[in-house]
Image (spheres, grey):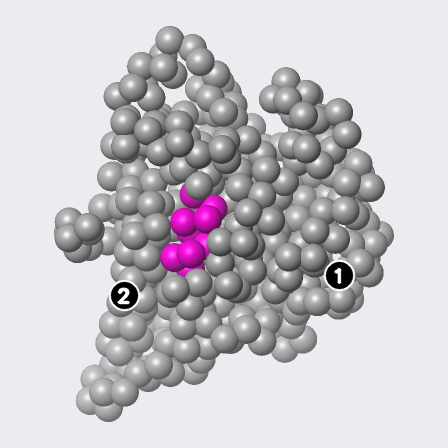
Amino acid sequence: MSDLASFTCIEDLRRQHRRRVPRMFYDYADSGSWTESTYRANEADLQRIRLRQRVAVDISLRSLASKMAGVDVRMPVALAPTGLTGMQCADGEILAARAAERFGVPFTLSTMSICSLETVAAAVSTPPWFQLYVMRDRDYIRRLIGRARDVGCGALMLTLDLSIMGQRHKDIRNGLSTPPRMTLRNLLEMAAKPRWSLPMLGTRNRTFGNVVGHVPGVESLRTLGAWSSEQLDPSLDWDDVKWVRDQWPGRFILKGIMDPVDAEKAVDIGIDAMVVSNHGGRQLDGAPSSIAVLPHIAQAVGRRTEVWMDGGIRGGQDIFRALASGASATLVGRAFLYGLGAAGEAGVTRSLEILQRELDLTMAFCGFTDVNSIDGSALWRE
Ligand SMILES: Cc1cc2nc3c(=O)[nH]c(=O)nc-3n(C[C@H](O)[C@H](O)[C@H](O)COP(=O)(O)O)c2cc1C
């Protein structure tokens, strides 16, 4: 894996991901909804933030160690929940969870993962955090929460911004399905990407592992498709959030908060953290970037709960910008998916190394030695 050292930034990993993974799945990761304006704004608004360079500060000893909801982390970053991760690379969730564990940051398993909760938990010694979507079938959700508890998940992260589905044009055009439909185009694509296809043929984890076999009547792909399309629950409200909270005595995180009014309601539920997130620009196109909203939410509720942010983080500098704008930690989605698609477990490790190194250097240039002390004084204001 010596060539991994030649990937010096997340963009290098993205290009390699694109080369190695069939287009349907690369596009699924690297796209936003409708015009993709929010998707682009997430990155662009971070890039616009200027930092204050400081000099003649003793920066010889530096620490990135922090805590997220009381959990020790090597840097204030967790891997975001991403659906179909096992389609970017065979057994993708297992590989990403292992890389995260070895590195010392949390991994969050999506409800819509390919590898199941039990499979991933058995592959690591620290069970993953679990991200929950509330579906119409509440009995299934109750059992799913029970399964997360049984395997020892360290936190439950409830996502609130997907009770209906944002429309992603590329996925529609590509006919995205899991596993891929065997059209001539898809077969040719897969034949042209043997480093993706061969391991995929060798694994049994090729469909939604948390669902198939756990819902009566959903045993095959055909029945799974019908089930998932009717299961998103547009009636989800704060009473449902309380219902979930009541079943989970452990760490509880709400994800998808983009408005100070909702942030107040989230705090009232009793949470350990909230994630300021627009789902990586995949849901409401036209929403502001996460980084634009973050200072408002941090100001409103930051003393009462931990405020984390995700969306558009493509380097350690972006993590620094988020911390300086009021977040105490961040999640990364595509930054780790690009690593996974590029080179499996080692690729995820590489993306974490890149983020760590860039965060450390940025902190040093700005005159900080402890990641936990980064604040608004690090930002250049005209
Ligand atoms: C391919 C992909 C799949 C995703 N699936 C989920 C999911 O299943 N559950 C969820 O809460 N968020 C999901 N998200 C959103 C991420 O958790 C996170 O909010 C987003 O990726 C952050 O933006 P970034 O990718 O620019 O870092 C997904 C994002 C991507 C890119």
Q: Based on the displayed image, in which of its 4 quarters is residue 51 positioned?
A: bottom left
Give residue 296's mark. none
Judged left or right of residue 349, residue 252 is: right
User: Could you tell me how far apart the alpha carbons at marks 1 and 2 are, in whole angstroms?
Assistant: 36 Å
Taking the magenta stretch, the answer to whether it contains residue 379 is: no
What amino acid type is highlighted by mark number 2? Glu
| Crowd class of label 2 (few under 14; some 14 to 19; many from 20; radius 10 Å) | some
Q: Which residues are magenta?
A: 92-100
Q: Which residue is mark 2?
A: 358
Position of residue 177 measured from the top left corner of the image (x, y, whole percent): 52, 23
Q: Nearer the viewer, residue 322 or 370?
A: 370
Query: Which residue sits furthest top?
Result: 184
Judged left or right of residue 17, residue 234 is: right
Q: Is residue 203 above or below residue 229?
A: below
Q: Secondary structure at mark 2?
A: helix
The answer to whether residue 211 is visible is: yes
Per the picture, the main secondary structure of the magenta-coloured stretch is helix
